[in-house]
Amino acid sequence: MVVAGSLEFAQGRTDTITNPLIIAEVLSKSTRSYDIDEKFAAYRSIPGFQEYVLIDQYKKHVEHYYKTDDKKWIFSEYEGENSILVLSSIQFEISLLDIYDKVDFEIKE
């Protein structure tokens, strides 16, 4: 999570930040649909929220959503270690090779 400025918490909570600029999540098979549908819908209701990054844990694949205007989002997909994820709301880029550094996809659960 990236926050611009000071952390703001939900009333009476110390574990719920209400002013994220960017949220990144690692997807699992059991939460993928929830993260993309319901969770993303809830995040979009946060006024300052600008980008959502979803990182697949089973292959080198990242989905990126960024806000361009009120209720307008752009979707980009990145696959393979040579792809470069470039964030829009802050100056930051990272290769999928770096995101997945030391990840062994051969290990079975």
Image (cartoon, grey):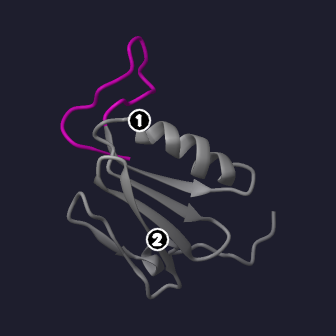
The residue nearer to you, when weighing 13 against 67, is: 67
The residue located at (51%, 69%) in the rendering is 62
Q: How crowded is mark 2: few (under 14 residues within 10 Å), some or many (20 or more)?
A: some
Report, in whole angstroms, how far the alpha carbon at label 2 lies from the one at label 1.
28 Å
For the residue labelled by badge 1, is the local secondary structure a helix, a strand or a loop? loop
Segment colored magenta = 1-19
What is the tally of numbered marks visible in this picture?
A: 2
Residue 103 percent across, percent down from the top left: 59, 72
Helix, strand or loop: magenta stretch: loop
Q: Give the residue type at disc 2.
A: Ile
Q: Considering the image in quadrants, where does the C terminus appear?
A: bottom right
Considering every residue shown, the one lying at the far top of the view is 12
In the image, residue 30 sits, relative to residue 19, either above or below, namely: below
**Image position of 67 with respect to 105: above or below:** above
Residue 10 is inside the magenta segment: yes
Q: Which mark is residue 29?
A: none
Q: Say which amino acid is labelled 1.
A: Ser
Q: Do the residues labelled 2 and 1 touch (CB within 8 Å)?
A: no
Quarter location, residue 17: top left
Q: x%, y% of residue 24?
A: 45, 54
Number of residues whose C-alpha sits closer than 10 Å to that of mark 1, classed few (under 14), some (14–19) or many (20 or more): few
Residue 75, placed above or below residue 5: below
What residue does disc 2 label? 99
Name the mark on residue 45. Answer: 1
Q: Position of residue 108 (x, y in %)?
A: 80, 69
In front of the other: 74 or 63: 74
